[in-house]
Image (tube, rainbow, N blue to C red):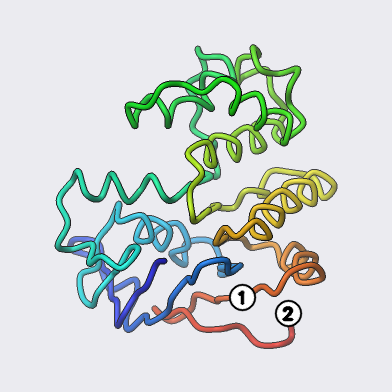
Amino acid sequence: MIEMRDVGFAYPRGEALFQGITLSLPRGSFHFLIGPSGSGKTTFLRLCIADLLPTSGTLSLFGEDAAALGRDAIARLRRRIGLVHQDTQFLDHLPVAENIALPMTIAGEPVDMAAIRDLLAWVQMTQAARALPPSLSGGERQRAALARAVILSPDVILADEPTGNLDWDMSLRLLQLLIELNKSGKTVLIATHDLNLVRAARQQVSARVLRIGGCRIQAAGAEL
């Protein structure tokens, strides 16, 4: 699905953030990406959607070399990847249902209200369909963001610190939704600093843990 071969990345006029990364996120796999704040977790997710391109090595999305693709081709492949941002990035003047529908609108597809209602029910937010984002709790915002991320039925779900501002009970509720997506065949990658979340997930799914450190990403040890 997403594959990196000897990938390196550095921002302009900056030191290398990544070097020699070789890994793959195969279909139906579950991954955690851990590391301290500022280690590059968000940058890695931006590489995964080709929002950034490697400064060395090869990034492949669904078998295609991202560096060889034009803007339209990259946009087409991104429709197969759902991204849950840490800050949710809603349009505050639009109701929740319309925010969830935005990926359909941007993709030029007719808005499927039945699909939106189903997703709202799945994340237990049916009553919030017409609510504006500023009125939502942190947990509601994250669940709505997950519904928006999967409205186009992507193959891969990337979540950037999705539980960072949530209490433990709400974190587990959101984790359960992500596990359900994985069990339906979706590839899931969660960037997090919360090792308790990792441990909770590994009681239910076979999750690979990747740790960022020293410009590289390596499989974490069994102590997790």
Residue where numbered disc 1 is placed: 209
Residues at discs 1 and 2 in contact (Cβ within 8 Å): yes
Quadrant of res 9: bottom left
Quadrant of res 219: bottom right
Residue at (57%, 66%) from the top-left corner? 28
Location of the C terminus (image quadrant): bottom right
Left or right position of 6 against 203: left
Left or right position of 83 against 7: right
Q: Crowding near pointer 2: few (<14 within 10 Å), some, many (20+)?
A: few
Location of the N terminus (image quadrant): bottom left
Q: Crowding near pointer 1: few (<14 within 10 Å), some, many (20+)?
A: many
Numbered disc 2: secondary structure: loop
What is the tally of numbered marks visible in this picture? 2
Residue where numbered disc 2 is placed: 224
Residue 103 is situated, as x and y percent measured from the top left of the image, at: 42, 32
- Amino acid marked by disc 2: Leu
Depth order, front residue of 183/217: 183
Left or right position of 96 against 10: right
- Amino acid marked by disc 1: Val
